[in-house]
Image: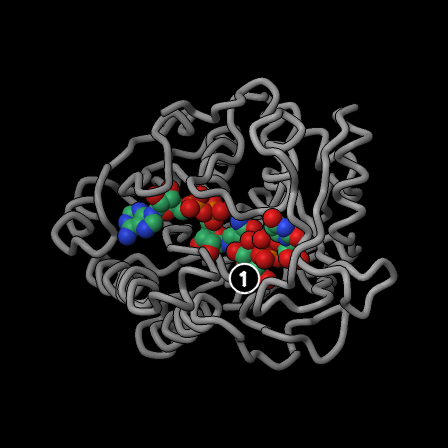
Amino acid sequence: MAVLVTGGAGYIGSHTVAALLDKGEEVVVVDNLYQGHKEALLGGKLYKGDLRDEALLDRIFSENEIDGVIHFAANSLVGESMTNPGKYYHNNVYGTLVLLEAMKKAGVSRIVFSSTAATYGEPEKVPIDEYDRTKPTNAYGETKLAMEKMISWFDVAHGIKNVSLRYFNAAGAHESGKIGEDHTPESHLIPLVLQVALGQREFISVFGDDYPTEDGTCIRDYIHVSDLADAHIRALNRLREGGESAVYNLGNGTGFSVKQVIDVSREVTGREIPAKIVPRRSGDPAVLIASSERARTELGWTPKFADLRPIVESAWAWHSAHPDGYGK
Ligand SMILES: NC(=O)c1ccc[n+]([C@@H]2O[C@H](COP(=O)([O-])OP(=O)(O)OC[C@H]3O[C@@H](n4cnc5c(N)ncnc54)[C@H](O)[C@@H]3O)[C@@H](O)[C@H]2O)c1
Ligand SMILES: O=c1ccn([C@@H]2O[C@H](COP(=O)(O)OP(=O)(O)O[C@H]3O[C@H](CO)[C@H](O)[C@H](O)[C@H]3O)[C@@H](O)[C@H]2O)c(=O)[nH]1
């Protein structure tokens, strides 16, 4: 039996593929390589193609014995989702519909889904737990919430059991040093800060220092990509054991400000890392911190990277050894 990983050549997907292979799982990947890199796959069988291609999905399910799906494939740039929401509904929501229909046809009844803290929008309280209100403030988060709900209705109607994992800020790289984060364009804080350390950018823009936080910059909950990978496998195994559908937050439960991220990166890299305060980026909540108690209790999940420094160290190990990522 194999696990189908959609978007498996992407950042979090490739780390999950690596973790599945370590556990001796057979892995099948579908990725159109829009953002992904075939070099990021440490094994498994790749179908290069689009999730929205019904015939391709039917072929993948008929050529392989799939017992569960881990679904990462999506577009995830918040800013772009605000200027081109149609792209997000088409790729994220319609893509998920095609996947679910193909699963239904093939009789595959387990899916672990990449959701996001963006489903909550501006939090009513921190830490955020799974019972808190979901009110996305951008089209990306709205499509992820729609995907979660669609998957739940396929459970009600067709018994497709599911776990939606709402992750906070993914960061870091694989311990082997072989795979890491390589997005074009890059929008995430830690890789951008490290690009400044590498001399590839002149300075890091700090999006606002007038937030109601101690140092005025936004606070986020950074979670290591390998800890995320581990949670996906635990979620899949829970479904294999007959567990009910569920939603879990995945974060460390500790927040770090943008300034703290820059300071820790200066310590880790020993480089100066110039920073410039620029206006706020629209749609950024001041503080996002996860309560992951439910994942800890029900999945037995404990993040190995509980502090920011080792997360930045692992990211730096990747970026300094691969300054051009996977290459052009
Ligand atoms: N990176 C984060 O901090 C973060 C936080 C919360 C949630 N997420 C979610 O996690 C998932 C993975 O994030 P990531 O940072 O690894 O992104 P990524 O862009 O690196 O990976 C997504 C992969 O999906 C592929 N893909 C996209 N559309 C496809 C399609 N129609 N058909 C086939 N392949 C397709 C891309 O080529 C890419 O390899 C996304 O769904 C994202 O929304 C990410
Ligand atoms: O050049 C930059 C980039 C980011 N930031 C700040 O750094 C923090 C982290 O920003 P990221 O873009 O790295 O991450 P986000 O918190 O915006 O987004 C992450 O969490 C979201 C959920 O809230 C989504 O899931 C999204 O995919 C995921 O990357 C934010 O306060 C942002 O304003 C800067 O100051 N300068």
In the figure, is residue 248 to the left or right of 296? left
Which is nearer the eye, 259 or 5?
A: 259
Picture quadrant where residue 5 is located: top left
Name the residue: 59% across, 32% down: 195
Whether residue 5 is visible to the viewer of this picture, yes or no, is no
Name the residue: 58% across, 21% down: 177
State yes or no: Cβ of the residue under disc 1 lies below 8 Å from any atom of ligand 2. yes
Picture quadrant where residue 269 is located: top right
In the figure, is residue 145 to the left or right of 83? right
- Circle 1 residues within 10 Å: few <14, some 14–19, many ≥20: many
Can you name the residue that lies furthest to the left here?
A: 55
Which is nearer the eye, 29 or 117?
A: 117
Q: Is residue 178 above or below residue 108?
A: above
Q: Position of residue 304 (x, y in %)?
A: 73, 39
Q: Ligand 2 falls in which quarter? A: bottom right
Q: Position of residue 144 (x, y in %)?
A: 44, 67
Q: Is residue 266 above or below residue 122?
A: above
Which is nearer the eye, 219 or 12?
A: 219
For disc 1, the marked residue is 116
Q: Position of residue 165 (x, y in %)?
A: 55, 59
Image quarter where the N terminus lies is top left
Which is nearer the eye, 113 or 314?
A: 314
> Is disc 1 placed on a helix, strand or loop?
strand
Amino acid carrying mark 1 in the image: Thr
Image quarter where the C terminus lies is top left
Can you name the residue that lies furthest to the right here?
A: 214
Q: Position of residue 77 (x, y in %)?
A: 45, 56
Color style of the picture: one colour
